[in-house]
Amino acid sequence: MPFFVYVLGSQRVNDRRTYVGWTTDLKRRLQQHNKGTGAKSTRGRKWILLYSECYTTRREAMSREWYIKRDKKFRATLRECITVGIISAFGKEQTSQIGAATSACNP
């Protein structure tokens, strides 16, 4: 079973945020965050998938999540991408992008 580490992004007026987590199902987890049933800190926002990595064990995924959460420079770069518009079209193709990421993962 593949395990994914992911970074979500959200933007409101003058407030860009990222959220880092891990899951076994990217599509389901993103839907949970956007429905308000995900982590408490993600409620009330529209989230898009900015980045994901695939691992073979839960331990590897959780370890990588820990490092990404503390990598402020990496997360700042992703936040900047939201504002600049590099990821502007990504939200429209989110489902197909997640499907491609899931099928491309060969842990």
Image (tube, helix red, strand yellow):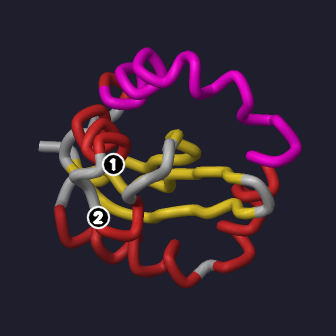
* CA separation in Å, label 2 and label 1: 7 Å
Does the magenta portion include 45?
no
Q: Is 53 situated above or below 27? A: below
Image spot of residue 4 (x, y percent): 31, 50
Question: Dot 2: within a 10 Å radius of its alpha carbon, few (fewer than 14), some, or many (20 or more) residues?
Answer: few
Image spot of residue 31 (x, y percent): 30, 36
At a point 54% along the width and 47% down the height, the residue shown is 51
At a point 31% along the width and 23% down the height, the residue shown is 103
Q: Quadrant of residue 100?
A: top left
Q: Quadrant of the C terminus?
A: top left
Dominant SS type (magenta): helix
Say the numbered circle drawn on residue 91.
none
Q: Say what secondary structure mark 2 lies in.
A: loop
Q: Is residue 107 visible?
A: no
Residue 53 or residue 29, whichever sits in front: 29
Say the numbered circle drawn on residue 33.
1
Extent of the magenta region: 82-102
Q: Mark 2 = which residue?
A: 39
Q: Say what secondary structure mark 1 lies in.
A: helix
- Total count of labels: 2
Image spot of residue 47 (x, y percent): 50, 44
* Proximity of marks 2 and 1: CB atoms separated by less than 8 Å: yes
At a point 50% along the width and 77% down the height, the residue shown is 69
Say which amino acid is labelled 2: Ala
Image spot of residue 10 (x, y percent): 59, 51
Say which amino acid is labelled 1: His
Tag 1 or tag 2, which sits nearer the N-term?
1
